[in-house]
Every structure is written in C-alpha cells, then in structure tokens.
Image: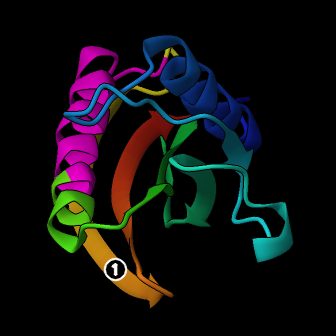
Amino acid sequence: MTSPKVIRDQIITILKNAKPKNAAGKSVIKWFKGEPPKSRWPGYPWGWVEWAGGPMEPPVGSKAEVNDSFLLVVVDRHIDAEKAEDSAMDFAESVEAVLDDDSSIEGLVGRSYVVNREKQKLFEGDYSICALRITLLTHRRQ
C-alpha cells in the first residue's frame, strides 16, 4: 500500500532531480515537506510540497480508488515587481513540464495531473515576493 507520505517524498525527489528553472536560469535551492516558518526560509527561490488530502471511493471488487491532492509551492522574490511576476509564471511552466514527464510518479500512482495553478504576491520592503501554488491530483487503486 502506497502512502501519501511516500508519494510526497517522491514528488520532491523528482523535482530536485529535474531542477525546474525560471527564465533567469535559477532553480529552487531547497524543497521542504510542508510550509516552513519564516525563520527557516532559505535564499530564494525555494519551495515545498504538502499533502492536501482527498476522497476515497469504496472498493469495487477488492480495491478502493484513492484520490490525493498535493500542493507544490515555489516562492521567489525580486526587487523588480514585473520580474517577480515573470519568475512565478516561468516556474509554473517548468514545474508543470516536470510533472507531465512522470505522471505515474515513478509508478506510485496510476496517473496524476495539474488541476489548479494560483499565485499570491506580497511585498517585503522594496521586494516583490511571488508564491506559485500548483495543485497536483493523483489517482491510485489499493
């Protein structure tokens, strides 16, 4: 039986190995298992993957259908607000491409696909900080 923790850890491994980048050629310097407190933020860009849960269907025959959502977040900042925006959009494209290349997450799930993309922006002093959140839905039978 595959647990959401194993799937989350494999998603992080895939992202670390693929090193998705923004247009400036920067890749995520550290991936966390869930959102860290601000005091542990490394330099930019950085990210996390967290399990968001999901429904289970009753067994048909001997196996249940399990649907899990995972949130993948990349945070970047720039002094130029437009470059921060562009970076978030670049990471959306490159992270999605990595996820598309391995939709079975190394065989742990039957399939996975991106179901939502969101962006949040905040300002810290003169810096524009953009966080991109991608929701990945996975399906498996167990």
Q: Which residue is mark 1?
A: 120
Residue type at mark 1 is Gln
Give SS at disc 1: strand
Q: Quadrant of residue 19?
A: top left
Q: Let me know if residue 32 is in the magenta part.
A: no
Left of 100 or right of it: where is 39? Answer: right
Q: Nearer the viewer, residue 49 or 132?
A: 132
Give how far across and how far down residue 135 sits, in percent. Answer: 36, 58
Left of 94 or right of it: where is 72? Answer: right
Q: Which residues are magenta?
A: 87-105
Give how far across and how far down residue 103 sits, in percent. Answer: 32, 24
| Quadrant into which the N terminus falls | top right
Asked which colour scheme the image uses, the reply is rainbow
Q: Nearer the viewer, residue 127 or 12?
A: 127
Which residue shows up at 19% across the image and 34% down it?
23
Give how far across and how far down residue 105 sits, in percent. Answer: 46, 21
